[in-house]
Image: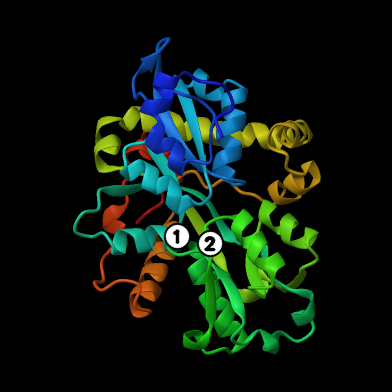
Amino acid sequence: MNRKIISLAIIIILGTMLLTGCRNETDSVDSSSKNGLTTVRVAVMTGNFTQYTALIGKQQGIFEKNGINLEITEYAAGVNTIDAVVAGQADIGNMADYAAVNRIGNTLDTNNLVIVSEIQGGDVNGFLYTAPEYADDLKKLDGKGFINSVGTVNEYYNSQIFGYLGFDEGKQNLVNSDSTTTSLALAQSGDVAAVFSSGSGSTYFEGIGWKKAIDGADLGIETYSYYMTTEEFNSSHVQVLADFLKATQESYDYIMEHLDETAKYLETTLGISADNFKSDWSIAKSRIGFSQEGVEQLIEIEDWAFNNGRYEKKYDISNYINTDALEKIYPDKVTVK
């Protein structure tokens, strides 16, 4: 999983992290200084904005220019990146709106997480994919297996899909998956009939012959994603966090200005299709900052999650937002009322 051979001593030190992380781009887990730079450990989601901006920003020296020695660990889902933050294995992670709301709602008594910036937001560039035999008659999906990822935004997507199709949500068969690899295995075995997928994951389902059934835009699905860290890291590393967010925005800008070059690099290093990356990235928008729309999205999801029994106590998600770092670098991008 690690891209370079490391010593037995480091393997022992990193044992826990390597059990949860999918791929490590660097070896050190120290939050310390290195060559005058401040080490920041970021946990990123595979095939996601966070992975691409971190990897390209590091490769192009953008984080280093902003005073950061960036260490990257890759995980299958956003919720796993936050597990790493809570466990002390990473400083910064990311989650989509539902996952963030759900995580906080289920850990109110022990939660030490804060949301520090939006990442992306808006219509989801994804589709409901089905096995070929259901593509022409979606009503046949009623009661069949839908891939589900517990604690992630996928739970919210499935609920929206059931409502769109007029299915009784309580009678649906949700089959849990922890990764795209597992989901593909379930799809190929016939244990599931449908999945909502976006980004690079869509290519895999198309590759096994599954069909696009419903566009995410038609489902009315919007998703925002957010960077999160601990209260302790946020309060004691405000400038470092500001530098990280600035470098992330600059990395996004670099990718937009060098799309062909970036696509070829990612195809070589990560094995993703250059054409698919360019297609996905052509509609990607960076939302580094914090807008009132981003807050309202969280409030709306929190209302939905509480009313649908995802946790027992209603709370005010705005109490878990902190824009101190953003206001140091992009005060004009903080439009929270």
In the displayed orientation, state which residue is furthest to the left.
109
> Is residue 224 visible in the rendered structure shown here?
yes
Q: Amino acid at mark 1?
A: Asp
Q: Nearer the viewer, residue 79 or 252?
A: 79
Where residue 113 sits: x, y (%)? 30, 48
Q: Nearer the viewer, residue 309 or 183?
A: 183
Crowd around label 2: few <14 · some 14–19 · many ≥20 (10 Å): many
Q: Amino acid at mark 2?
A: Thr
Where residue 182 sits: x, y (%)? 60, 58
Residue 97: assigned label = 1
Residue 223: assigned label = 2
- In the rendered view, would you say 285 is above or below 147? above
The quadrant of the rendering that contains the N terminus is: top right
User: In percent of the image, x 50 and y 57: which residue is there?
Assistant: 224
- In the rendered view, would you say 55 is above or below 21? above
Crowd around label 1: few <14 · some 14–19 · many ≥20 (10 Å): many
SS class of the residue under badge 1? Answer: helix
Where residue 255 sits: x, y (%)? 67, 35
The quadrant of the rendering that contains the C terminus is: bottom left
